[in-house]
Every structure is written in structure tokens, then in C-alpha cells.
Amino acid sequence: MTSSAVSRLSVISNHITGNNTNNESRGDIGLIGLAVMGQNLILNMADHGYTVVAYNRTTSKVDHFLENEAKGKSILGAHSIKELCEKLKRPRRIMLLVKAGAPVDSFIDQLLPYLEKGDIIIDGGNSHFPDTNRRYDELQTKGIEFVGSGVSGGEEGARTGPSLMPGGSQAAWPHIKSIFQDIAAKTDGEPCCDWVGPAGAGHYVKMVHNGIEYGDMQLICEAYDIMKRIGKFSNKEMGDVFAKWNKGVLDSFLVEITRDIMYFNDPNDNTPLVEKILDTAGQKGTGKWTAVNALDLGIPVTLIGEAVFARCLSAMKHERVEASKKLQGPEITGESPIKDKEAFVDDLEQALYASKIISYTQGFMLMNQAAKDYKWKLNNAGIALMWRGGCIIRSVFLGEITAAYKENPLLENLLFHPFFDKAIIKAQKGWRSTLGKAIEYGIPTPAFSTALAFYDGLRSERLPANLLQAQRDYFGAHTFQVLPGKENELLPKDKWVHINWTGRGGDVSASSYDA
Ligand code: 2AM
């Protein structure tokens, strides 16, 4: 046997047994990208007993990291992609935490010459799922296992326990499962990380997570605006309300931080700092991706859509300033019209809770449709559990969603589960009363309003789309179907019918086509 054949065999046998006698190759996992998220994930992995090899495009950051944060920990440095690959056990596990887009493709290209069949590349960045689909397909043809993983929880989550949403090559999962589940957040002892599904499913679920995050934030902002402008609450009073809500059904990370923001004063003059922030929201695009995907798949994810548009409207500051001088509407001058503040706050809590239930219902409707269209098998209970802790939308409420899907994995619609059905029924009076006040006093509530409109639409056996179909048929001969039980000679059963609506010539004629 030639020496190269022997060394090839030894690589294969190491691969199979997991043994690795090469001292150089002791890294359990490599991580590329030493911005804060990357550094914190490495430190988290090292805390859990893994040896991590760190690499960054700007290699001075590797040295700085090794000499400071990584000092004394099981972290090795690499100054080239080749060195990184040489220092890893087989199959190699390499995680990218770099800027989404071209840098991900660039690193994949740089890695390929040094990888062997069965090695694993994990993209932990905020990649758009169609990119992950494409990379997965390309790497499958090369025998490289590709995983696109959502990572949520921000810098702190990365350090202490993020929510991780991995998807892609199923063959990679047994090799990364323990690292991922060890470093992930835990809720009731269960890791907030499980296998999501094939190809870009992990990044898809992360995208929907971000969309829901947009929705949750907008809802909280509307509640704040209602308390401030109708209730005339001080920031301290609002902080107390959020603190109270955080002990009930709305217990969540976002309500908790909003409480802290309300209490936070500018040390210069001891007045609330939040009131000094310019009211134009930024966005990086993941909410928009969710809304665009919802339009593509034909699912009414209206609340996330409104949340994205609300940010767009906020960004039009100049136009709003002009409009505020010109456009008339109701105004509250002087004292708040609210007499019973406690009832007002309780109603608002119900409005927020009900709207949140609608938003998550819409989010899961979208994921169910994506699973059908993209032929993914998505585990809804697992997804809710992954979001239960570690990530920005973490909340007690996600525990209820996990339980509902565990009880019935095939649940058609979250609102059909008795828990949420009852919750919405109970919340309805306060929800409607809050919206009535917002409309009366001219406070914009796009997210609250669309949630209620969706709810009322969903529970309407009959919507005015009959008229819409008539209009379409009138001007464009688009045809329509007949309501069951209303068939007659002019309107036959199981046909697409076109009517001559203008009746020119005095006759009403119809033509019909097979359905
Ligand atoms: P840098 O430190 O060399 O800039 C977050 O920005 C991470 O993505 C950093 O590790 C950064 O590397 C990396 N990154 C950003 N743009 C990149 C690019 N075009 N090519 C490679 N890495 C990039």
C-alpha cells in the first residue's frame, strides 16, 4: 500500500471512530468571525468543555482575543483558513458568524480546498433563507454538510445561552447536537435548540422569529402611546404598569426591558431618557423578509406587515411634522378623559395579550404554509420551545404554545386550541374597548387594529368577497362560483360562471365553464 493510501485510510478510520491521534487536530469546532457575537459563542462553548479554534479575516483580532477574553480557556487561534482546518478534529465543524451576504460565500469558497467529504459548515449569521437553500444545494453536490442556524438572544444570549435554530443537512445534526444543546438557553431543563428541518428551514424560522419580534415591539409601543397620550401617565406610572404585566400573562423579555426603559432617567436632568430619543425607527430587513414571504405564500400575516409599515411611517419624520400642522383630528387638551385608570390598564393588558395571540397565530400559519410549499417537516412544538428561552421574544406565553402543539401537533390553527380560544374570548371586551378609545382620540394603533380585524375576519363565515368576485367578473370576466344551495339554471353548480352584468340588449346571459 502506498503511503498516501495509508494516510487516506487513517483519515477515514479516524473519521469513523472519532479518534484523532494528531495532536494538532484537537479543536472540537472552529469559529470564523470575532465580532462580539462570535467571541461570546466561543467563550460559551469553551465554558462547556469544548476546544474552539478561532479565526477572523482581520487576524490581529485573533491575537487580541487570545491575549484577553480567551486567555486561560480552551481556545486556540488560527491565522489562516488552512491552519484553522488543520487544527480541527474530523469531521470538521466550522461555524461562520460573519456579516450576512457575500462574506458567507467568500468564506465557504476559501474553506472548500481544505475540507473533506462529511465536514460541516454552519452559518450562524442572519442569512436570508433563499441564500441558505442555495448554499445547501451547492455544498450537497460537494459532499459538505451545510447547516444554516438561527442564533437569537443578542450578545448576552450568545455568552450565557442563546436560542439556536439549526436546519439544513440532517447528517450534520448528530455531530453538532451536543455542542448546540449544551450552549443553548435552557427552559425547565430543556434546551432551546432542536433540529428545525432541511435546507434553509433554520434560517426561515429565525426570520419568522424576527418578524414576530417586530410585531411584539410594535404592540408594546402602541400600548405605551395609549397610556401616554390618552391616560396621560408619567413614565414612572408606565414603568409600574409594565412591571405588573411582567408578572402575568405578558411575562416576557420585551415587557421586562420596557419596564426598565420607562424607569430610566437621564442623569443630566433626571427626566426619562426615552422621551429624548428621535422617533424614527431603523430596521435591518428581517421583518420585511417575513412580510414579503407572507405575501408570496398568500398568508395574511397582517400584524408583522403593519409593524414593518409602522417603522416606515416613523421614518418619514419630516412629512409627519408637516402633516401634524395641517391635518385635523381629535385632540385631548388638558386632563386625561380616563376616570378609572385601573380598568383602562386592565383593558389595555387584554388588548395586548389578544393581539399577541393573533400575531403568533399568524406566524405559525405562515410556517405551516412554508412547510407545505417548501416540503419541509417543521415541528411547531419544538419551534415554540426554541423561542421559549434565550431569544428576544422569550416569554411565558411561548410555554403555552409549546404545550398546545405538544398536545396536538396537527393543530390547524392556534386559535382553535381551547386555551387560546378561551383567552381570546376573555380578552375581547377589553381589546375592543381599548381600540374604541384609540379611534375616538386619534391614537394610531396599526398592530392592535389589524389583529382585531384579522380576528373578526377569521370568525366571519361570510365575508364581502362575493361582491369582490362580482366586480372582477363585471370588469374583467374573471368568472365566479356559486354559493352552495343557490344554484339555478343561470347559476349552475360546480361551474365557473360569467354574467353579462350590463344586460345590454335587454337579456341577462351567462356562460359557464367546468370548475
Ligand atoms: P473583520 O473583523 O475582519 O471586519 C462581523 O462584522 C464579522 O464579519 C467580523 O468578523 C468581520 O471581520 C466579518 N466580515 C465583515 N465583512 C466581511 C467581509 N467582506 N469578508 C470577510 N469577513 C467579513
Image: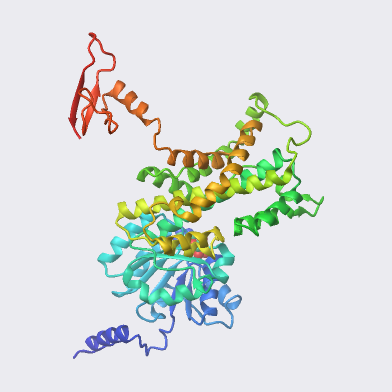
- Residue shown at 26% from the left, 13% from the top: 503
Number of marks present in the image shown: 0
- Residue shown at 67% from the left, 28% from the top: 330
Q: Position of residue 210 (x, y in %)?
A: 49, 54
Location of residue 395 by image quarter: bottom right
Q: Quadrant of the N terminus?
A: bottom left
Q: Position of residue 62 (x, y in %)?
A: 53, 73
Q: Is residue 116 above or below residue 19?
A: above
Q: Position of residue 514 (x, y in %)?
A: 17, 33
Q: Residue furthest right?
A: 269
- Residue shown at 61% from the left, 59% from the top: 251
Name the residue nearer the viewer: 317 or 309.
309
Q: Is residue 358 above or below residue 49?
A: above
Q: Is residue 192 above or below residue 411?
A: below
Q: Position of residue 508 (x, y in %)?
A: 23, 15
Q: Is residue 386 above or below residue 422?
A: below
Regarding residue 110, the answer to whether it shows in the image is: yes
